[in-house]
Image (spheres, helix red, strand yellow):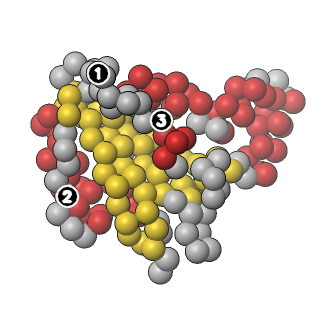
Amino acid sequence: MATTRGVLYVHTVPSALCPHVEWAAGGILGVPVKLDWTPQPAAQGQYRAELSWQAEAGTAAKLASALRGWQKLRFEVTEEPSNGVEGERYSFTPELGVFHATTGVHGDIMVPEERLKAAMLKAASGEADLTEEVERLLGRPWDDELEPFRYAGDGAPVRWLHQVV
């Protein structure tokens, strides 16, 4: 099995769920996880943390599946490409649910041909606007919602997702 690296970004979580997030991540990674929780300045009463991990390919999907059930949580999980396996990005917000994208070696989102064709057909039939459909395929609604939470905190440097993928 290919080994890869990734990052779990917990953007917002109430304090009561912090230990549950650690327990879920530890269960997936097979090691105890203790995160450094800091207050989330963009959401009063919420906390944030980051976890860099190394594990087998497919771990990002497992982490996203384990965490998506908690509606008070906002998170992103990235997984770097590895030998024979594309990278992945998952984003979750309570309002939008889960976004998943395959990422290339430089962190770019790779949109499958069939999904682009479906977006073009919806636009051609008048069901949807092509620009909005492509933005959705690229995860823009999730990016727009998560952007205020991606800051590390007051006075700390901003760590944007596209710089660490």
First reached walking from the N terminus: tag 3 or tag 1:
1
143, 106: nearer the viewer = 106
Q: Please name the residue shown 30% across and 22% down the image.
A: 155
Distance CA(mark 2)–CA(mark 1): 26 Å
Relative to 55, residue 38 above or below: above
Assign a secondary structure to mark 2.
loop
The residue wearing badge 3 is 160
First reached walking from the N terminus: tag 2 or tag 1:
2
Q: Which mark is residue 154?
A: 1
- The amino acid type found where label 1 is placed reads Asp
Q: Please name the residue shown 52% across and 49% down the image.
A: 165
- The amino acid type found where label 3 is placed reads Trp
Total labels drawn: 3
First reached walking from the N terminus: tag 3 or tag 2:
2
Relative image position of residue 63 (x, y in whole percent) = 36, 56
Q: Quadrant of residue 116?
A: top right
Q: State yes or no: discs 3 and 1 in contact (Cβ < 8 Å).
A: no
Assign a secondary structure to mark 1.
loop
Assign a secondary structure to mark 3.
loop
Label 1 CA crowd tier, 10 Å (few <14, some 14–19, many 20+): few
106, 25: nearer the viewer = 106
Q: Which mark is residue 33?
A: 2
Relative image position of residue 44 (x, y in whole percent) = 22, 19
Relative to 51, residue 125 above or below: above
- The amino acid type found where label 2 is placed reads Val
